[in-house]
Image (cartoon, coloured by chain):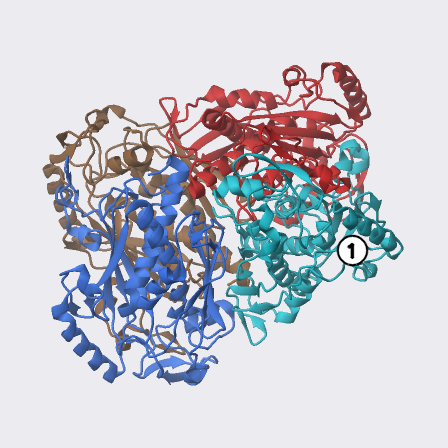
Chain colours: A red, B cyan, C blue, D brown
C-alpha cells in the first residue's frame, strides 16, 4: 500500500516534492465543529519555517498555507480538509553536481534503488520540506486535542551534538532559534553552530516531546499500541535514528523495584513509563525522546560512486540545515498530536469517549 | 480500527488471552507455493518457550502449534493460515491478590481505564504470552524471506542490566538460555540472575536484531518508511521502551563527516545508517536495538491503590520472568521478519520484484 | 492487502478451507461489555447449517462453534474474539473426477489462474462453507446492534427461480426451509426443487434483507458510503451477481417526482431510497436485494477443458445445494449486521454516538 | 476511518466541496515510469464536464486540472500525484431557498443528521461535482492498465428512463451527449429530455461498463473479491441504487445448465459470469450494469420539512442535471479502472505479475 497516509481514523495523506509546484496534504477524519482558520495552521508552519535564523537552511519559503476544503464559516465540516503550500524558492541549479552521484547518508541511493529513477531536485520526495504538510495537519490535531481534552503537546531540544541542554522553562523554548528550554546555553549553541558551518559539516541532536493531560485508556493493543504508533510516526521523520518513551534506554539498567511507577491515591510517584503502560496511556505525561542524525548534505568531501558505479567524491553546496534537529521540534510535536488524535477517535469508537 | 492486525500486505491478526482456552493468529497474504509445515513453526516457538531454564518463568506450556488452514500437501495455498496454540498450564489462583489492585509498571491500570473491566487472569491480553502467535507468524516470514531472497534474520542479547555482552559469534547465541553471543560472560549472567531471583526483583536488557541480504529499495516513504514500520513493530512488543536503527542515539553526537556511510564500488565503508536510508533499505545489514524494561511482576513490595482508590501495597508471586529480555530475542526476530515480508510484497506491488 | 478481513473498525478476519482441519474467524473491535455466549452464535449457525432439509446439500456438519478468546464471565472484554468451527464431514473422494477439470461457472478456473495451484477438495477456499464464520461474526454484530440501538436485521427469499414469493409475515420465514415469508407458496417451491434435483440442475434466487431502527447519520462519504459498503459485502457473497438498495433497478424508469421520498413531520411518505440517502442512513428501514445465481456444481453434463487445455465434459456428483439461495438469507443478514456495526463505530469516532 | 480514500494499493484520496475553493485528489501508489501529462487527465475530465450540451447542468466549469506532484519529466515518479481543480462558477445564490429545508431524495437530510451542520452550498460534499477528481484519478488508472496490459475500459448508456438503447457500436458512444451506442435512438432521447426539462422533473438511467483484456486471476477472496470491490466503487457513486455483474438479476431465473459458461480450448462459450468467477477475473470481459436513480433537485413541488420540523414544500431551481445518468459513463469507467489497477497491484504483491 502506498505509504503516504498516516493514521487510521484521523488520516493525513501527504503529497509533493521539494521542487515541484506544490506540497500539501489531505486531512480526513477531523470531526465537524472545530473552530479552524488558516492562521491556526500558519502559526505552526512559521515555527518550522526555513530562513528564520542563520543556523538553518537559507532557502526562503513563505510556506503560506491555503485551506481548499473542509472548513465552512470558520468551523470544520467533518469532510476532508485539503491543505496546499506552493513552492516558490526552488533553486534546482544548486543540485547540478549530484545528479550522477549519491550523497553518503542520504536517501539518494536507496530511492534510486527503489524507484529506478532519480528526481535530483532538492531531494525530491525525501526532502525534509515534506514535513511542512505534516506540521500543517498537526496544527489541526493540536487544536482539536486542546479544545476537546485540554491536551498540551510541547517539545524542546535537550542536546545539540555534545552540548547538553538542561530544562529550565517552557517559555524559554520559543525565545531562541534552537527550541532550547534554557537561555543560558544559547550562546554556547550558537558558537558551536558557527564553527560547524565554517567547517562545512553537520551534527546530530536530541529532541524531547511531551503531551500532558492525555486521558488514560488510549491505545489499541496488541499491535497498535499507543507507544508503537508514536514510534512509527517519529522514526518515520527524516533523520530520526532512535525513539524512546519514558526511561527509554535507561530502563535497561533499572531494576523493577526502581522502574515501576508506584501509585498512590494522589497519583503516580514517578514516570519512568513515560505515560504509557502496556501500550495504553496511563494519564501521566507522555514523554518521547528522539535521536536525530547529522545531515548528509555537507561541504566536507566524501567518497561515493556514480550511477555507473565508478568511484568519485561528493561535496554538497547549497542552503542546507547544518543540524536538522534545530527545526525538528515543531514537527515532532505535530506527529505526536496526529497520533494522539487518531487514538482519541479510536477510543471513542471502541469504548465511548475516553 | 481494532489494533490486533500487523502489516498491510502480509497481515498477522492475533487473538487470545493468557488464561483463555487458546491463543493464535491468522496469517493472511503469504504467497502460494512456500514449503511449510508445523515443525517449521514449532522450531521458533520452542526457542521462545517458557520453562526452558531456571532464568525464565516456570510456567510450563508446550506451546504446540496446529495449522488449521492455508497449507495443502506441504505448501502454502495463498489463502489465510490459521495457527492455534492451546493454553494448558494456567494457574489462575496465582493472581488472587491482584484482582483489586494494580501492579506498578504493569498494564493492569491502563487496561482497566480503557476497557472498564478487568481480566485478572495472568495479565489477560496484556500478557507476554501473546507474543507466541507473533513468533509463529514470524516463522513463516523467516522461511519465505530466506527462500525468496536468502535473507537471514538473527538476534542476540547485548546487555543484561549493567552487564555488557560483547559479540563473539552467532553460534554461541543458541548455546545458552540468554541468547548471548558470548560464552565467557554466561557465568556472570547466571550469577546476576540468581541474585535477582533471590531478591524477588527484575532487570532490563538490550537486544540487537540483524537482517542480512535484504535487497535495496524496500520501504514506503514518507510515512510507512521501513524503519518506521520496524519501530512500530518493536515498540509494540511488551516491555520495549526504546528502539533504534544503526548508530541510534549515538548519532546525536556524530558529525555528518563521520556518520554518513561512504560508498565505494565494493560497497559501503560503514553502517551507521543501520541499513536504512531515507526510510528505504540500502542493501546493508539492517541493525536494530531494543531497550527492554524490567518486569513489573516482582516480589518486592510496592505502593499502589485498590480499584476503589484506597492506598495499598502489592507483591506479585507466581511464575514470572525476572528478565523479560531473556526471551525477547526470538520475538524481535519474528517481528523484523514480519515487517520485512510485508515490505517485500509492497515493493513487488509498486515496483516489481526488488 | 490480503482480502480476508471485512470492515475497518469492526473487523472480521476469516480463515479456513472447506476440507481442511477447521474454519473460523477472528472478530476484532467489538466493544467491551456485550453479553455474549456460544449459544448466541450457535443459534445463527444452525439457521445456516447444511443437512437441515432435503432441499439443501446433504453434507452433515454440526458446525459447533467454540469461543477461543475475547469473552470473560459472559461478556466481551474488548479484545479479539476467536471463533473456531471444526470440519468433520469431509468426503474428499466425491471430488475425484474434477481434479483435472474446471466446472463451468465455478471458481475452479479463476483460482487456478490466480494461485497457480489447485486445492480440489470441495472448492477449498471458494466453497460456500466459508460463509459459516461470517455468520458467526454476524451473530455478534446482530446482538450488539440490538442491544445498543434496538436494530433488527431480518431477511427472506422473495423469488425462487421463476416463482415469485409475496411477503406475508416475518413469522412465516422461520417456519420453512426456504426462509420464505409466505406459507401458501411453500408447496410450490418444494415441488419445483424436487423436479430440479431429479434433473440434476440448479436455479437462482432473489433475497431481501432489511434493517430496521437504524439511526440516521451512518455512512462515510464519499467512498465508504453505507450503501457502498453494503454492496461490497453482499457482492462478495458466493453466487451473488447483483445488489440493489431500495427501488434498485426500478429507479431507472422512475421520475424524480415519484422516486424522491417526501418528508412530513411524521416521517417519510415512501422508501424508494431504501433507507440510504447520499450514502448515509436516513433513519428509514434499509432494504437490500440480492440476485443469486444458480450453483455451478450440477449433474448435467457440460463442456469444459482439462488443466492441459484439452476438451472434456464435466458432471459434478456429491452433496451440493441445488439452490445456494436457500441458505443465503442468514448469511446476508450477517453481512448487513457486520457492515452496520462497522459504521456505528465509525460514526461514534467521527461524530459521537449517533 | 475517514471514508474518503478508495483502494488499498492504488489509493485515491478525494477532497473538496462543490462550492469551496477547489476540489481534487491525491493518487498514491502509481508505479514509477508511466508516461503521464495533464492532457491525459484533461481528456477524461472533458468527457464528464458540465455545460457541454443542453441536456446536462448549465453550470460552466472549465474543470482544468493541475498536476501538483508525482510527475517529473513526463513520467510518474512513484510518489503521490496531487491533482487540483479550482472551482470557478459557483452561484451560491441559487440555493437560497433550501437552506432551511431538505430536498426529498437528496442527501441534505442525512448529511445534516450525520454532521449536525449544513453546508447548503450546492450540495457541499454530497454534490456530484466530487466525481471530477475520481475521473481525474481514473484517467491515470486507465492509462496504466492500457500500457501494462492492453486493458480497455469503456461504457455506455443502455437505457434512459423507459427508452431502451440497443448496442450498435462503440464509435457511436462518443458522438452524442448521452454516451449512447446507437445513433438511431438519439433523437428520441433528446425529445424525451426536452419534455422532461419543461416539466421540471428528472429520470433514471442504466449504464453499462466493460473492461476487456483483463488477465485472469485478479481479485482477493474472500472479502475483497474483484466483483465486491467493483460493487463498492459503483454503489458509492452518486445516484446509483443497483449494481450487477454479468447476467445480474437475470441469473435469478436461470438454471445452472444455462448460466454456467462452458469452456472449450478456444475459450468460453458465453459470459453470464460477467468476467468474474468466485470473485476472481476469468479473462473474459468484465461487464457491469448500474441502475441510476433520478435527480432529487427538480422544479416539481414536493412535500418536505424545515430544520425545525415544520411541514413545507420544496422546489429546486438552478442548473441541475435532469438525468445524472447522462454524465455517469465516464465516471463509471474511471471507477472500474481504479478498482482494476488496485487489484493488478495486489496480484503482483501476492502472486507475481498476473
Local packing at callout 1 (Cα closer than 10 Å; few below 14, some 14-19, many 20+) is: many
Where, by quadrant of the figure, is residue D85 drawn?
top left
Q: How many marks?
A: 1
B329 and A59: which one is in front?
A: B329
C292 and A348: which one is in front?
A: A348
Q: Chain of mark 1?
A: B
Residue C68 to residue A180: above or below = below
Residue C341 to residue D128: above or below = below
Residue drawn at the location 54% of the way across and 63% of the way down? D351
Question: Is residue B55 toward the left or the right of residue A327 in the image?
Answer: right
Residue matched to label 1: B178
Where, by quadrant of the figure, is residue D120 drawn?
top left
Residue B254 to residue C220: above or below = above
Residue A106 percent coordinates (x, y) = 71, 39
Residue drawn at the location 20% of the way across and 68% of the way down? C175
C100 and C189: which one is in front?
A: C189
Where, by quadrant of the figure, is residue C334 drawn?
bottom left
Residue A223 percent coordinates (x, y) = 57, 48
Q: Is residue C102 something that shows in the picture? A: yes
Question: Is residue C54 toward the left or the right of residue B155 in the image?
Answer: left
Q: Residue furthest right?
A: B184
Residue B247 percent coordinates (x, y) = 77, 41
Residue A155 percent coordinates (x, y) = 63, 26
Q: Is residue A116 something that shows in the picture? A: no
Residue at disc 1, secondary structure:
loop
Residue drawn at the location 56% of the way across and 76% of the way down? B73
Amino acid at each position: 500500500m502506498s505509504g503516504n497516509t498516516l493514521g487510521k481514523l484521523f488520516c493525513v495523506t501527504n503529497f509533493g516534492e521539494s521542487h515541484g509546484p506544490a506540497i500539501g496534504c489531505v486531512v480526513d477524519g477531523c470531526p465537524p465543529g472545530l473552530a479552524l482558520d488558516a492562521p491556526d495552521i500558519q502559526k505552526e508552519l512559521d515555527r518550522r519555517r526555513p530562513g528564520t535564523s542563520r543556523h538553518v537552511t537559507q532557502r526562503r519559503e513563505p510556506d503560506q498555507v491555503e485551506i481548499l476544503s473542509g472548513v465552512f464559516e470558520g468551523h470544520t465540516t467533518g469532510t476532508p480538509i485539503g491543505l496546499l503550500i506552493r513552492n516558490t524558492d526552488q533553486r534546482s541549479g544548486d543540485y547540478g553536481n549530484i545528479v550522477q552521484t549519491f550523497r553518503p547518508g542520504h536517501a539518494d541511493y536507496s530511492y534510486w534503488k527503489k524507484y529506478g529513477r532519480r528526481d535530483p531536485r532538492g531531494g525530491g520526495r525525501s526532502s525534509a520540506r515534506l514535513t511542512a504538510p505534516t506540521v500543517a495537519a498537526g496544527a489541526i490535531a493540536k487544536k482539536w486535542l486542546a479544545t476537546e481534552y485540554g491536551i498540551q503537546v510541547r517539545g524542546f531540544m535537550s542536546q545539540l551534538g555534545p552540548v547538553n541542554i538542561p530544562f529550565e522553562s517552557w517559555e524559554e523554548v520559543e525565545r531562541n532559534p534552537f527550541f532550547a528550554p534554557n537561555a543560558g546555553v544559547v550562546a554556547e549553541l550558537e558558537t558551536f553552530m558557527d564553527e560547524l558551518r565554517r567547517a562545512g559539516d553537520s551534527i546530530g541532536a536530541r529532541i524531547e516531546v511531551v503531551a500532558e493531560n492525555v486521558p488514560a485508556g488510549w491505545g489499541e493493543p496488541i499491535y497498535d499500541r499507543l507507544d508503537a504508533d508514536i514510534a512509527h510516526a517519529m522514526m518515520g521523520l527524516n533523520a530520526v535514528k532512535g525513539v524512546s518513551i519514558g526511561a527509554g534506554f535507561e530502563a535497561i539498567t533499572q531494576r523493577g523495584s526502581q522502574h515501576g511507577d508506584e501509585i498512590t491515591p494522589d497519583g503516580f510517584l514517578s514516570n519512568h513509563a513515560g505515560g504509557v503502560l502496556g501500550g495504553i496511556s496511563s494519564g501521566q505525561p507522555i514523554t518521547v525522546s528522539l535521536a536525530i542524525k547529522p545531515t548528509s548534505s555537507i561541504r566536507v568531501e566524501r567518497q561515493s560512486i556514480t550511477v555507473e558505479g565508478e568511484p568519485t567524491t561528493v561535496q554538497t553546496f547549497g542552503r542546507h540545515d547544518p543540524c536538522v534537529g534545530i527545526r525538528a521540534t515543531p514537527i515532532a510535536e505535530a506527529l505526536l498530536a496526529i497520533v494522539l488524535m487518531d487514538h482519541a477517535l479510536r477510543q471513542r469508537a471502541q469504548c465511548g469517549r475516553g
